[in-house]
Amino acid sequence: MSGEPRPLEIHLRVNSKRGTTMVHPVAAAETVEVPIQYPREEEVKHYRKWFSWLIPLFVVANIVMFVITMYVNNCPRNSVSCIASFLGRFSFQPFKENPLLGPSSLTLQKMGALDVSRVVHRHQGWRLITCMWLHAGVFHLLANMLVLIGLLFVISGFGGSLLSALFIQSNISVGASGALFGLLGGMLSELITNWSIYDNKLTALLTLVIIIVINLAVGILPHVDNFAHIGGFLTGFLLGFVFLIRPQFGWVNQRYAPLNYSPGRVKPKFKKYQCILWVFSLIILVVGLSVGLVALLQGVDANDHCSWCHYLSCVPTSKWSCHTEAAYCQSNQLGNQLNVTCSSNGKSSTYFMQNPTSSQIQQLCTQLCS
């Protein structure tokens, strides 16, 4: 019955040895309740999945800007011949003018390419930002969209544009190459500042240095803006010490240790050398970008203060020349017949066009003088 007390349960253990049977009473085993420790909220939150939306957004933005640029370019209207003419106004400029399958230089200039004369004399400083969202062609776009990452990408692109504008003031420049070199610089500084948490450190460092050297070596070829690469790399290298610093393992273990765990010595979140690199990198970055921007807006030509620096962007050989001259032509319109003569090489050609615009004549001049 429910009102009667339950009898005491006794377990019997029987041992048989040499035919002798012995019975030993064993006390009832006591049940010990062990509390279950569930993980704390901060431990679970550390391993939650997340979706990276910034990188796809940058890729889409660059593709959209390229499509808009090709729409504005309208090759059939402004040029005599076009590549992939079945695309209509989205067709590409001739290979002789743009071998990357893209728009003309005048269209890129109109859309916001980096043009030092416009930045300095017309106060169009926004071109330092807009140029990294433009691309010279399909090949250029595909190469640059392979790697992208957030704020490091944007600031490195700005730093690359700034150094390029200080040294190369005769040509326009577009592309995200400086920003991509900033990612390489950020990878290198991240490896250095978090040196103690990596395995195979020397192998990773050697591989990364080889990749950086090869990419910078390509920049000595003509028509490649190596100053944007160098500026982006240096900016990303400094940003890596600021953005990509990680806490040491001892501090992480203390934070996620059980409640009853008492460490012998409390470890700081970051090591001393990490904090020193963080402070110095932030100071150099802020001062460098500020001084460079002020110098650019005042029309300073960095080549006047560094006579050998131009070799960092192009090394002249017997196969190519590093000097690029602006195209100047003389044109004469007779009815629907346009005669264009290049002033630099003396070449002339006749085109049949009705009322050509100045943009069309300039593009024909560029093709004739190239």
Image (cartoon, rainbow, N blue to C red):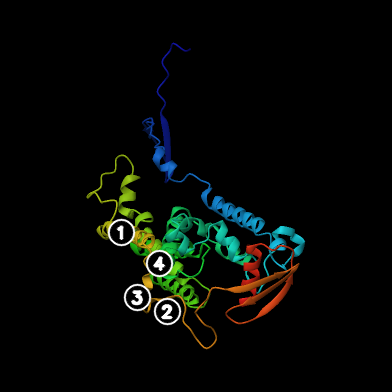
Tag 4–tag 1 contact (CB < 8 Å): no
Helix, strand or loop for disc 1: helix
Q: Which of the two labelled residues, at mark 2 and mark 3, occupies the earlier sequence position? A: 3
Q: Amino acid type of disc 4?
A: Leu
Give the CA separation, mark 2 to mark 1.
Answer: 26 Å
Q: Name the spot of residue 178 as percent of width and height, x first.
A: 47, 64
Q: Amino acid type of disc 2?
A: Tyr
Helix, strand or loop for disc 4: helix
Q: In which quarter of the image is the C terminus?
A: bottom right
Q: Mark 4 points at which residue?
A: 166
Q: Which of the two labelled residues, at mark 2 and mark 1, occupies the earlier sequence position? A: 1
Q: Name the spot of residue 67 as percent of width and height, x first.
A: 64, 56
Tag 3–tag 4 contact (CB < 8 Å): no
Q: Residue 311 carries which label?
A: 2
Residue at image position (53%, 63%) is 174
Give the CA separation, mark 4 to mark 2.
Answer: 15 Å
Q: Which of the two labelled residues, at mark 1 and mark 3, occupies the earlier sequence position? A: 1
